[in-house]
Image: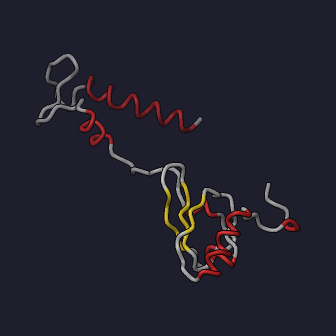
Amino acid sequence: MTRGIWKGPFVHPSLLKKVDKIKDKGKKLPIKTWSRNSTIIPEFVGHSFLIHNGRTFIPITVSEEMVGHKLGEFSPTRKFSGHTPADKKAASDGSAPSGGTKTAPGGSSSSPSSPKTSTTAAAPAAKGKDDAKK
């Protein structure tokens, strides 16, 4: 549920005080804040903020397009490391030996057309697809 219009946007009172102080000084030092749920208002345009993401402070300079959004929207809390292919994951785990031939867990060499190799590789993928459909 959203905030009532008659209440106006929420801005933490201490954040408003800090912005007013900086306007009076003339120096535009970054304002450090933990108030991620504060709405960006037109008085914030041109100021720089250090917004806490739970671990570090992310520097943000407010522009006109940001007005109406929350400060926390511009400070992501989760780091996306990207999607890695299965072969890169196996190589980083050390489970896949280096070299041209792959060996089975028992130590015997098997060809890629072997049903033993294809069923073990296809079974987890098929299971994941069925789970995703449910």
Across and down, in percent, residue 74 comes to: 56, 63
Specify how the rendered protein is coloured: secondary structure
The quadrant in which the N terminus is found is: bottom right
Left or right, 88 with respect to 53, comes to left
Quarter of image, res 16: bottom right
- In-front residue for pair 113/2: 2
Given the current orientation, which residue lies at the most extreme bottom position?
A: 26
* Residue lying at 24% horizontally and 38% vertically, measured from the top left: 91
In this rendering, is residue 19 above or below 86? Answer: below
* Residue lying at 88% horizontally and 68% vertically, measured from the top left: 6
- In-front residue for pair 39/33: 33
Quarter of image, res 113: top left
Given the current orientation, which residue lies at the most extreme top position?
A: 106
Left or right, 103 with respect to 83, comes to left
Left or right, 125 with respect to 42, comes to left
Across and down, in percent, residue 85 comes to: 33, 45
In this rendering, is residue 27 above or below 101? Answer: below
The quadrant in which the C terminus is found is: top right
Q: How many marks?
A: 0
Given the current orientation, which residue lies at the most extreme front position?
A: 25
- In-front residue for pair 49/79: 49
* Residue lying at 69% horizontally and 62% vertically, measured from the top left: 38
- In-front residue for pair 108/73: 73
Across and down, in percent, residue 30 comes to: 53, 70
Across and down, in percent, residue 10 comes to: 76, 63
In this rendering, is residue 111 above or below 133? Answer: above
* Residue lying at 22% horizontally and 20% vertically, measured from the top left: 105
Left or right, 102 with respect to 115, comes to left
